[in-house]
Image: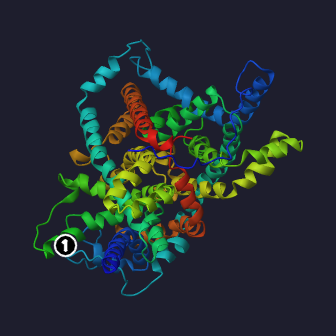
Amino acid sequence: MKKKRYFGRGAMFLLCAFFAVAFLLPTVLTITNSFMSEAEINSNYGMIFSTTSGGYVSEKVNLKFIPDKVTLSQYITGLIKSPEYLLKFWNSLLLVVPIVAGQVAIASVAAYSFTRWRGKIRSGIFFFYVILMLMPYQVTLVPNYLVSDWLGILNTRWSIILPGMFAPFSVFLLTKFMRRIPYSLIEAAKVDGAGEWDIFTKICLPQCRSALYSITILVFIDYWNMVEQPLILLQDAEAQPLSVFLSSINSGEIGLAFAMATVYMIPSLLLFLHGEEYLVEGIANSGSVKG
Amino acid sequence: MKKIRPKKQNSGEEPRKKKGNSLRTKEGRQDFLKSLCYLSPSLLGVAVFFIVPFGVVVYYSMIDGVGSRNFVFLKNFIALFKNSAFLMAAGNTLRFSVLAVPLAVVLAVVLALMLECRIPLKSQFRTFFLSPMMVPVASVVLIWQVLFNYNGSVNELALLLGGGRIDWLQSDYCQWVVILLFLWKNLGYNMILFMAGLANIPRELLEVADVEGASEVYKFFAIKLRYLSPTVLFVTILSLINSFKVFREVYLLTGDYPYEKLYMLQHFMNNTFKSLDYQKLSAAAVVMAIVMVFLIALLFKAEDWFGKDVEG
């Protein structure tokens, strides 16, 4: 009986390990391939992105993890020789940081409202937020475009930032966290004569510090990799974020694309590794639409 | 089966106030105003950026042109349902979701159950499964090209094993390539949701089942699955939404006009958008919104129905 259990667990472990390798593969491949020289990339993948001229192109595709010779040449090309990529990286930050900050700030006030006061109308509004949160981007795309056009902010960063700030996802998640704060805490503060704003800033916000952190990470990762919105609302190539620009790197510069993708991964990677527990908690709490 | 009542969670929630809920009392009105005050920044933004323009979209879907503005009611919708590109796109999207969403749910449950067993390196595995969240779309697309190109690694492997080459992205297999991408991206997130659901099952119940000598399979179907049912429904909704988002990768992999089977609703929307056909676009957006609301309502009803004996 016991032996069988150990065997089962061993098999389970192997299966998990198999899945884990499959899941990690693209990430690892991106990072390791970014240290290859362009010539090596060409000889490995030349067959696929065959518009490249010159250089030795092998007949077979060669999926390779470990570079023959580790070189930083791609990074030097991307980061030092041309300012283009750093500029696009800066564009990404200019878009995503205001969205994250705005969304979390607006959502925390709204979540406080949904937590402290309930009623038929307000739960109706909350339900509407849930529906809105679940709408695919293709449905909200046209409305977004129309408003940006009316407000005259089409082709500026604000056409992405403003709708992003009001996206209902954080409101939903933060409300779920805030509703866990024991009511006795709020009651006690009220007895001591605290006003609503005091209760909000001195009790609710400190109580859900970890929730705020996990929402920040989730929202950041989501918008850091956005593609559709800038493609449609931001026609100006100069203002495009790196997430869009990366995919337009032409086929002769695959190595460069890997290197810049690695650079682009760094902020989310840092947030991820630093706050994984919070991230997991955040995801776990988004688990049920109701309550 | 006996009703199972878990310990009520969130016991610290605000108790329902009898007085405060009514708009007739002074206190009730004050509370309502205060709550509106805190809600207003968000509500205002949502109204300006989502509700009002969506109203306009509904209006656009019922007139015959932005210039002439004649009210035609359902004509645009009828034209839409006769449009072969729309029908093909809708069919492909439906087929993709029907295949991908159940797979995403079932495989995520399996992963969560696997990680629930006491195996070494558990938290590392969790990290690995979540890692696809961070990878930039562009490099995902590059790697998928390396893997599934006609000269790509998967075909090399197939040749090595004695199979033939398949042009994955230009054949009927293309949908499976995209499903694989979708699963790779989303399974980790779904798995975390299920792990949280599994952690909420009362331990005593499982212990009693162990003492009674219940098999693992029985425990799964009779206890775990019943407690997971709200999570199952939520993950279903989430995966449905994410199955729409996979367009991002498909678009970057195959461009505006991909192989026929990959031409999804989002391609249709995008291409209509580029040709500035507002009527067609608005009608399609309205149809999509109605279908989504209908699906979400259906899933909520299902949650009520399945969850009723556990939520108690």
The C terminus of chain A lies in quadrant: top right
| Direction from residue A222 to residue B258 in the image, left or right | left
Nearer the observer, A79 or A66: A66
Q: Position of residue B102 (x, y in %)?
A: 31, 49
Q: Callout 1: few (<14), some (14-19), or many (20+) C-alpha neighbours within 10 Å? A: many
Amino acid at dot 1: Glu
Q: Can residue A148 be seen in this view?
A: no
Q: Residue at x 24, y 64 (%)?
A: B149
Q: Position of residue A187 (x, y in %)?
A: 80, 43
Q: Residue at x 81, y 42 (%)?
A: A197
Q: Residue at x 48, y 63 (%)?
A: B134
Image height check: is A79 above or below B298? Answer: below
Q: Can residue A277 be seen in this view?
A: yes
Q: Where is residue B27 in the image (x, y as percent from the top left)?
A: 80, 25
Residue B40 sits in quarter: top right
Q: Residue at x 21, y 59 (%)?
A: B168
Where does label 1 land, which residue?
Answer: B156
| Direction from residue B300 to residue A266 in the image, left or right | right
Nearer the observer, B236 or A219: B236
| Direction from residue B50 to residue B243 in the image, left or right | left
Name the residue at the front extreme. Answer: B212
Residue A119 sits in quarter: top right
| Direction from residue B26 to residue A26 in the image, left or right | left
Circle 1: element type:
helix
The N terminus of chain A lies in quadrant: bottom left
Q: Position of residue B83 (x, y in %)?
A: 25, 28
Nearer the observer, B152 or B179: B179
Image height check: is A79 above or below A151? Answer: below
